[in-house]
Structure formats: structure tokens, C-alpha cells
Amino acid sequence: MDAIVKNFPQTNRDSDRPSQQEAEEAVRVLLRWAGDDPTREGLLETPARVVKSYRELFSGYDMAAEDVLGRTFEEVAGYDDMVLVKDIPFYSHCEHHMVPIIGKAHVAYMPDGRVLGLSKIARVVEIYGRRLQTQETMTAQIARAIDDTLNPRGVAVLIEAEHMCMAMRGVQKQGSTTLTTTFTGTFKTEPADQARFMTMVRSR
Ligand SMILES: Nc1nc2c(ncn2[C@@H]2O[C@H](COP(=O)(O)OP(=O)(O)OP(=O)(O)O)[C@@H](O)[C@H]2O)c(=O)[nH]1
Ligand SMILES: [Zn+2]
């Protein structure tokens, strides 16, 4: 756990966490605050359901990207060109309003001898998505995790997402998309690599 706290400051220690009972009580307070009655039949099980659902929606705090990215392999017949996994869907929650962010991540890297299992890239998106996030932070974290563990020649991450806090409330603009990118290594220094990444992401 200490390694997780050190490398991923968003995560807290198990001992700092409130109990299940305390979390359920907090949901009861919010239900009363919203104007409802947590003792009515339909809401009796709701605090337990919400807490269980939060466990799943915020399960990324209990996982470290290094653990899933640790397993790499080299036997790819000298393949050294771009590997792109695009259209990885994710649901996250914004750290300002705790309302969903719904989007897709496109993640590429230029191997330097070793490659990752493809599913591991989608798992990293899950690990950072299932936390309270800003889109910028999530984009940078995915890129950094792959850069640090695989040491590839470059990493490119593009995330496109709709923020429900801008659609359901506040400014109420439905359908707007936010794009964020992080480029490292050759994707940062070689405009041609960056352009090829963008073209491949955009091609249908
Ligand atoms: N940069 C960034 N901003 C975000 C993200 N998710 C939500 N926000 C914004 O965070 C800001 C929080 O602004 P505040 O003025 O503190 O909060 P607010 O009064 O609820 O703002 P409104 O949403 O404009 O009603 C809003 O502009 C949100 O649109 C994100 O991933 N990245
Ligand atoms: Zn928000």
C-alpha cells in the first residue's frame, strides 16, 4: 500500500477510510438534505446500494497502474512501429461535482523492444477513470504510467469526453466534447509521428 500512496497521491490508506456504516450514514444525510425520507421503504436499502456502487465506480483507488503494466514481452519479430488502441470507452467522475464524465481514450506508444498486452492499456484507462478526476489529470496520468513502466520511445494519449456537470446542470450545454492530449518522446519531438497518431485516431 505504501508504494501506491507514494506514486499515486490520489489514493489514501485503508486505515484513513471511513467504515461502510459511516459511508451509509453519509448517504442518509444527503437523502434528507435533498428533501427525501431515508426511512421510507423505497430508500431503506439505498445507502447500502450507493456505497456498493461507489466501491465499483471508484475502484481505481485500490489499483496501481504499475501492477498491470509490469507484464511486458519482447517476442514481436522486431516490430517497432506505433501501437494504437483507440476508442477505449470509459466512465469517470469529475472531482468538482462528482458527476459523470463519459468519454473515449485513444492511447498509442512507440515500442523500444518491449510491448504491452493490449488489454493492459484499457486496464490503465479503467484505473485512472474510476477515480475522481479532471480530464487533464487523467490524460497525463495514463501517459506517465506507460512512459514510466515501459520506457517506450514515445506515448500519445487523446481523450474526448462529455462532462455531465456541463450538460445536466450549471451552464447546461449538452453535446459539447472536450479534447485533451499528452505527448511524450517522439510524439512530442516529431510532428510527423504526432500527425500520424491524429490521422489514425480520426480514421474510421
Ligand atoms: N479543466 C477542467 N474543468 C472541469 C473538468 N470537469 C469539470 N470542470 C469544470 O470545473 C469548474 C468548476 O467551477 P466552479 O466555478 O468552481 O464551480 P461551479 O460554480 O459549479 O461552476 P459551473 O459548472 O460553471 O456552475 C467548472 O467550470 C466545470 O466545468 C475537467 O475535467 N477539467
Ligand atoms: Zn464537474
Image: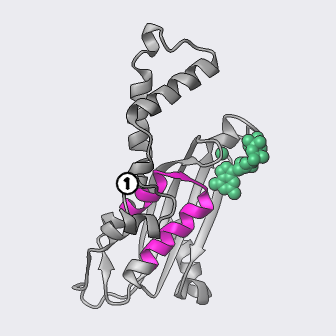
Q: Mark 1, residues whose alpha carbon is within 10 Å: few (<14), some, or many (≥20)?
A: some
* The stretch drawn in magenta includes residue 136: yes
Q: Looking at the image, can residue 33 be seen?
A: yes
Circle 1: element type: helix
Q: Looking at the image, can residue 202 be seen?
A: no
Start-end of magenta stretch: 123-147
Estimate the x, y position of residue 61 in percent, counting from the top left.
43, 54
Type of amino acid at the residue the image marks with label 1: Asp
Estimate the x, y position of residue 39 in percent, counting from the top left.
47, 10
Estimate the x, y position of residue 124 in percent, counting from the top left.
40, 63
Specify the quarter for ligand 2.
top right
Scheme of image coloration: one colour
Between residue 158 and residue 34, name the one nearer to us.
34
In this picture, is 20 found above or below 113? above
In this picture, is 186 found above or below 126? below
Which residue sits at x=37%, y=81%? Answer: 150
Which residue sits at x=59%, y=18%? Answer: 32
Q: Give the residue at the far top of this rendering.
A: 40
Residue at the spot of label 1: 62
Estimate the x, y position of residue 193 in percent, counting from the top left.
54, 84
Horizontal side of 165 relative to 199 (left or right) equals right
For the N terminus, give its image quadrant. bottom left
Q: Is mark 1 within 8 Å of ligand 1?
A: no
Query: Majority secondary structure of the magenta segment?
Result: helix
Horizontal side of 184 relative to 41 (left or right) equals right
